Image (tube, rainbow, N blue to C red):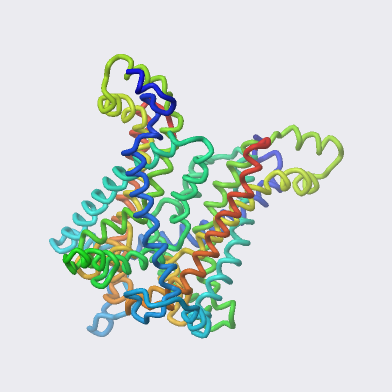
């Protein structure tokens, strides 16, 4: 018996069990092997991406010179930036509303605000397609000058991003001590001054986290964009979709790797920015 | 909390932009979709119009969803999603369990590693899977070293289920992690002290106490699986069609918007049903809440 009671060998030290470690490693390998090979093969010289032939940056140069791909990537980033700014503002306002006021039918209002998060993406996509087609926005907006011809997609992205921002900002606001607000007002600050100098600085980590969430959600979205974009406007996921249907090519790997790097940096940044807030008063 | 009457100027400033956006670009489109589901293609001069739709209040679109063809697809979507959910649970539980019992300093990194793939574009992840599973893919090459294969691993139900598990696993890990982390370990010790085996302890103590997390995870994975369109489209092809693909076809190639709308609403009702079930189960279970 004594042999089994070494440190790390107790009945509850599951973290040291070999079978759990093996299983754990196996599942992580399954999660990461496809992504890692995708990145690795973006440096491959083989055209069909089947076997490893040699290291090259050629695929990145080709992707960079592929105008359609670059246009799609620019569109995606422009859409994501607009959608992030709009949905962060709108989402934060709704969060403030739900945090500060009680009003009739508030539960129902909250329920409706959560709807875009829960309903299947494809339903929202086709509903917006129907809406844009029936109001004539589909034809009008597409003829506008860039980047305004992306307006439909931006509107759609804001519609599904801002409820997420609301959730994030609201969970930050829960920790706010309202006496700070009272103190500010007692000291003679106006409603606006209190908002700008007391509440906004407190909300800031939530705002940043919400904005980065909105940015990645917008950059990531395929289904809703697929339905709301006209035939002329292409975003990066929509472009990759049409390329993938034709087969695998190292150029897609290169472009995907760039996008992966962007999202991973944004995510890690968001986590870094949120971390100190947790240790503090939050 | 203030009453909205106390400071109505601030109230309306905060309320208007969000409410406007939600009503104009979410509720109204859904309303249109709802009316469209009771419509049929207009007949102009004896010809069925391609673009015009009359809202006649007909139920034919809903009745058509219960044709054998579509009923099979709906049934298939349900069991494919159910299987994907089960596999998610089976793989996510050890992961969540492992993270909870890992050394404290490793936890944030391990959690990040689980969540990170979730942030990477869905399309890119699906594309990565195609490269792994196709006929000249890495799996077949590896099998080839042992003189096996090549097997057709793409464009069947297996690849779709694998794809769904791969894509939605983080949704399962997070709620499980949250409940297992809050689990009072003295219950496990008590069970072991009283002579139960590890296996028995797991089944009779750990699983019931983490049930809320399991339920949340199941719902969180099942709903997006049921409505998925991209994964069955790219990994399943024509052999593994799900409701999402039928809806897409009605709005693009087949150009039958009323029928597509009816199917969308059926999908939404199923989603709401799953959510209602979740809150019902959550109310009944008295253990740790997520």
Which image quadrant is residue B225 in? bottom left
Q: Answer whether residue B246 is visible to the viewer in this image.
A: no
| In this picture, residue A188 sits left or right of residue A105 | right
- Compared with residue B42, is residue B96 higher up or lower down, i.e. above or below? above
Q: Answer whether residue B241 is visible to the viewer in this image.
A: yes
Q: Residue furthest front?
A: A3
Query: Camera-side residue: B164 or B136?
Result: B136
At 43% from the left and 67% from the top, the residue drawn is: A222
Q: Residue furthest left?
A: B68
Q: Residue furthest top?
A: B194
At 57% from the left and 54% from the top, the residue drawn is: A268
At 80% from the left and 34% from the top, the residue drawn is: A183
Query: Camera-side residue: A8 or B74?
Result: A8
- Compared with residue A205, is residue B135 higher up or lower down, i.e. above or below? below
Which image quadrant is residue B167 in? bottom left
- Is the C terminus of chain A in the top left, top right, bottom left or bottom right quadrant? top right
Q: Position of residue A262 (x, y in %)?
A: 55, 64
Q: Position of residue B243 (x, y in %)?
A: 26, 61
Query: Camera-side residue: B136 or A249?
Result: B136
Q: Position of residue A164 (x, y in %)?
A: 52, 51
Q: How many marks?
A: 0
| In this picture, residue A187 sits left or right of residue A108 | right
Q: Residue furthest right?
A: A188
- Compared with residue A107, is residue B226 higher up or lower down, i.e. above or below? below
- Is the N terminus of chain A in the top left, top right, bottom left or bottom right quadrant? top left
């Amino acid at each position: 018996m004594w042999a089994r009671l070494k440190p790390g060998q107790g009945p509850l030290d599951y973290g040291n069990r070999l079978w759990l470690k093996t299983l754990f490693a196996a599942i992580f390998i399954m999660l990461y092997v496809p992504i890692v090979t995708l990145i690795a093969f973006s440096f491959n010289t083989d055209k069909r991406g089947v076997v490893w032939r040699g290291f090259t940056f050629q695929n990145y140069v080709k992707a960079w010179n592929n105008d359609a791909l670059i246009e799609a990537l620019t569109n995606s980033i422009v859409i994501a930036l607009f959608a992030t700014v709009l949905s962060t503002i709108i989402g934060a306002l709704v969060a403030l509303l739900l945090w500060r006021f009680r009003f009739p039918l508030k539960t129902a209002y909250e329920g409706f605000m959560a709807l875009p998060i829960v309903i299947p993406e494809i339903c929202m996509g086709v509903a917006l397609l129907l809406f844009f087609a029936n109001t004539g926005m589909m034809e009008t907006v597409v003829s506008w000058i860039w980047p305004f011809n992306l307006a439909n997609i931006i509107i759609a992205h804001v519609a599904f991003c801002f409820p997420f921002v609301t959730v994030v900002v609201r969970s930050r606001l829960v920790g706010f001590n309202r006496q700070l607000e009272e103190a500010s007002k007692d000291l003679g600050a106006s409603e606006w001054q209190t908002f700008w100098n007391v509440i906004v600085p407190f909300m800031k980590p939530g705002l940043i986290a919400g904005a980065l969430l909105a940015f990645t959600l917008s950059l990531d979205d395929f289904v809703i964009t697929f339905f709301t974009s006209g035939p002329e406007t292409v975003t990066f996921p929509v472009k990759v979709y049409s390329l993938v249907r034709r087969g695998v090519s190292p150029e897609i790997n290169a472009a995907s790797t760039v996008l992966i790097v962007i999202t991973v940096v944004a995510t890690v940044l968001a986590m870094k920015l949120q971390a100190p807030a947790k240790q503090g008063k939050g | 909390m203030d009453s909205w009457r106390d400071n109505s100027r601030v109230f309306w400033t905060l309320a208007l932009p969000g409410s406007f956006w939600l009503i104009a670009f979410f509720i109204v489109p859904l309303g249109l979709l709802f009316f469209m589901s009771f419509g049929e293609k207009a007949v102009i001069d004896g010809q069925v119009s391609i673009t015009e739709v009359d809202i006649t209040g007909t139920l034919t679109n809903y009745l058509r969803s219960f044709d054998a063809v579509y009923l099979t697809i709906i049934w298939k979507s349900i069991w494919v999603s159910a299987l994907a959910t089960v596999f998610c649970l089976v793989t996510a539980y050890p992961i969540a369990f492992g993270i909870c019992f890992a050394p404290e300093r490793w936890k944030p990194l391990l959690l990040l590693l689980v969540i990170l793939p979730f942030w990477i574009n869905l399309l890119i992840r699906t594309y990565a899977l195609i490269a792994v599973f196709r006929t000249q893919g890495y799996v077949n090459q590896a099998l080839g070293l042992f003189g096996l294969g090549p097997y057709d691993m793409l464009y069947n139900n297996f690849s779709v289920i694998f794809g769904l598990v791969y894509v939605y696993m983080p949704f399962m890990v997070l709620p499980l992690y949250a409940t297992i982390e809050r689990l009072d370990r003295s219950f496990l010790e008590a069970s072991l002290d009283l002579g139960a085996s590890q296996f028995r302890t797991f089944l009779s103590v750990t699983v019931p106490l983490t049930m809320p997390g399991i339920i949340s995870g199941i719902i969180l994975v099942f709903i997006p699986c049921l409505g998925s369109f991209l994964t069955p489209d790219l990994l399943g092809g024509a052999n593994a069609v799900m409701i999402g693909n039928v809806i897409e076809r009605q709005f693009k190639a087949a150009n039958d918007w009323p029928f597509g709308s009816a199917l969308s609403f059926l999908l939404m009702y199923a989603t709401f049903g799953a959510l209602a079930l979740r809150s019902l189960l959550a109310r009944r279970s008295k253990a740790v809440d997520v």
